[in-house]
């Protein structure tokens, strides 16, 4: 019995080994090798993750180009000849090759058994939020903006679009074989959600253009959260011709919202806050058009002077001597402490190491005289700040002294469209509500009858402040380049939006930047009242 069992086992083993050998022999025949090596895979495009605005509106990949897969046949050969395509393309078809034709028009060819159309993403259909989104290099890696700082996330969230087909050694499509379209997460919607509002972003970009701002910037904050709703900078550049802009003197690659500039009279609001918080009062001051401190003469923006003014009037009319006097009474230490608590002198990380400029906050040793302190009190000297920092300070006033950390990343979306929030920003009180009430009254007066009245709107009330800062830089004709500012929030009674506008090489903050503020604020207001 045992011998029979052993004999059967040996027989089965022999048969198994024989079959394995036969299968190996068959798989090694020229015909089989030829069939296996006939599969061709061609990559059409590699996508990156999506970038959305706060309402999940796409900011990239909103348009397509089209790749047409054209199979060799008498029909397609005649079609291309009728349309007078180049001889090389027609010759490939005549030789039996599959060809690919790219077009911006999805109706270039009608789809049928011989022609298939593949939509291919156009990553940047326009310049919307150009300086925030950034761009990629030829290897599809992020170089600037969100594309750079979230490169790993956007790369992992992308996919591949390719085709697979069977062809002979001369790459001729095998008769009767179809072309397989392989979509590996190419059209999935995974991506990053920004705080940017696409509509408000366009309002900001259009306002800069409409008011002929050649070099400047706009930032709009959600007053209630600190989220960045718009971030526009000019001049712009063309992503498709970057080399044309590398040596440009206008520095189009800079996002000017995050660059530091001399601030000028906007800082008078900081001086006012510091004085009030430290119980320093200057209820009445007579401006004669100039003031002397430490043997230095400082002039007012109004040559003949403003006469007798209080703080509200001094803010509205942007009176230099008033704030030089107030600043020296308040003291350098108090001014520096208030400025630092308000966010000046430190950079902001907008996500994954995307740091803004910190600006320059003077050292105590820099303010070693009444003249130096007075100069600082109205935003001159070494002090510089970014439009973002100025907007955040104004937003603190809008929120009755609550500092709200600005942020740009709202969250993410997966391929199923599910949103996941990602906001760990902080907020805290930096000065009293009563202090802000005084500033709000003064800034409302600025819009209604002061230096900001060019931005007055019949639709709503706004609190504003203007500035025209000396830069210490001169143009080719020897004229000093001025940095013009206009900033504020609205509606005054319940602020929802905080806006800051700058212009390089301007004339005055009110006349240069005020119309930009007005256009943006009115468009936002009208949009907010429109039925959804």
Image: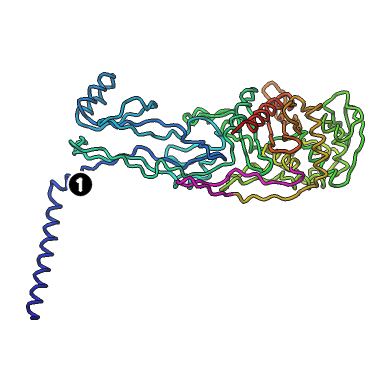
Residue 513, placed above or below residue 377: above
Residue 68 in the image: x percent, y percent?
32, 30
Left/right placement of residue 128 relative to residue 10 reads right
Q: Which SS class for mark 1?
A: helix
In which quadrant of the rendered image does the C terminus lie? Answer: top right
Residue 123 in the image: x percent, y percent?
46, 35
Residue 30 in the image: x percent, y percent?
13, 47
Was residue 417 drawn as part of the magenta stretch in this picture? yes
Residue 424, placed above or below residue 48: below
Graded by Cα atoms within 10 Å as few (under 14), some (14 to 19) or many (20 or more), the crowding at tag 1 reads: few
Q: Camera-side residue: 156 or 135? A: 156
Which residue is the site of mark 1? 36
Q: Residue furthest bottom?
A: 1
Was residue 199 drawn as part of the magenta stretch in this picture? no
Task: Magenta stretch: give its range.
Answer: 399-422
Task: Choose top left, top right, bottom left or bottom right for residue 355.
Answer: top right
Task: Choose top left, top right, bottom left or bottom right for residue 508.
Answer: top right
Left/right placement of residue 485 relative to residue 176 reads right
How many numbered markers are drawn?
1
Left/right placement of residue 78 relative to residue 355 reads left
Colour treatment of the image:
rainbow
- Image point 91% across, 27% down: which residue? 307
- Image point 40% across, 30% down: which residue? 65
In which quadrant of the rendered image does the N terminus lie? Answer: bottom left
Residue 477, placed above or below residue 501: above
- Image point 10% across, 62% down: which residue? 18
Residue 348 in the image: x percent, y percent?
64, 45
């Amino acid at each position: 019995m045992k011998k029979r069992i052993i004999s059967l086992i040996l027989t089965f083993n022999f048969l198994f080994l024989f079959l394995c050998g036969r299968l190996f022999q068959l798989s090694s025949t020229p015909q089989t090798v030829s069939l296996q090596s006939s599969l061709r895979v061609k990559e059409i495009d590699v996508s990156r993750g999506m970038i959305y605005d706060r309402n999940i509106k796409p900011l990239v990949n909103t348009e397509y180009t089209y790749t047409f897969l054209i199979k060799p046949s008498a029909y397609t050969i005649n079609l291309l000849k009728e349309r007078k395509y180049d001889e090389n393309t027609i010759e490939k078809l005549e030789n039996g090759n599959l060809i690919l034709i790219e077009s911006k028009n999805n109706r270039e060819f009608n789809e049928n058994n011989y022609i298939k159309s593949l939509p291919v993403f156009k990553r940047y259909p326009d310049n919307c939020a150009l300086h925030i989104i950034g761009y990629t290099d030829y290897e599809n890696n992020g170089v600037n903006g969100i594309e750079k700082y979230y490169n790993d996330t956007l790369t992992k969230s992308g996919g591949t679009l390719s085709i697979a087909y069977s062809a002979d050694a001369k790459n001729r499509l095998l008769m009767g074989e179809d072309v397989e379209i392989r979509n590996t997460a190419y059209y999935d919607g995974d991506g990053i959600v920004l705080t940017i509002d696409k509509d408000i972003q366009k309002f900001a970009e259009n306002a800069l253009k409409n008011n002929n701002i050649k070099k400047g910037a706009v930032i709009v904050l959600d007053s209630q959260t600190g989220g960045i709703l718009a971030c526009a900078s000019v001049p712009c550049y063309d992503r498709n011709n970057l080399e044309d802009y590398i040596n440009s003197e206008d520095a189009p690659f800079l996002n000017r919202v995050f660059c530091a500039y001399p601030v000028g009279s906007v800082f008078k609001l900081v001086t006012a806050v510091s004085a009030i918080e430290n119980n320093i009062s200057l209820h009445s001051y007579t401006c004669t058009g100039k003031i002397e401190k430490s043997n230095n003469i400082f002039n007012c923006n109004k040559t003949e002077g403003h006469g007798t003014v209080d703080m509200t009037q001094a803010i509205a009319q942007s009176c230099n001597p008033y704030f030089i006097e107030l600043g020296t009474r308040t003291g350098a230490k108090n001014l520096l402490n208030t400025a630092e608590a308000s966010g000046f002198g430190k950079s902001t990380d907008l996500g994954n190491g995307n740091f803004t400029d910190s600006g320059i906050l003077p050292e105590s040793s820099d303010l070693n005289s009444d003249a130096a302190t007075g100069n600082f009190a109205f935003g001159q000297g070494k002090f510089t700040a970014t439009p973002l920092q100025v907007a955040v300070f104004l937003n603190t006033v809008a929120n009755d002294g609550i500092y709200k950390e600005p942020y740009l990343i709202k969250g993410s979306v997966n391929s199923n469209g599910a949103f996941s929030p990602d906001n760990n920003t902080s907020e805290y009180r930096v000065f009293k509500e009563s202090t802000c009430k005084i500033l709000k009254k003064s800034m409302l007066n600025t819009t209604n009858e002061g230096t900001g009245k060019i931005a007055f709107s019949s639709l709503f009330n706004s609190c504003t402040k203007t500035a025209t800062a000396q830069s210490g830089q001169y143009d080719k004709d020897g004229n000093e380049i001025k940095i013009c500012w206009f900033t504020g929030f609205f509606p005054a009674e319940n602020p929802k939006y905080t806006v800051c506008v700058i212009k390089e090489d301007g004339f005055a903050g009110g006349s240069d930047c005020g119309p930009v503020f007005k256009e943006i604020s009115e468009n936002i207001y009208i949009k907010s009242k429109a039925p959804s």
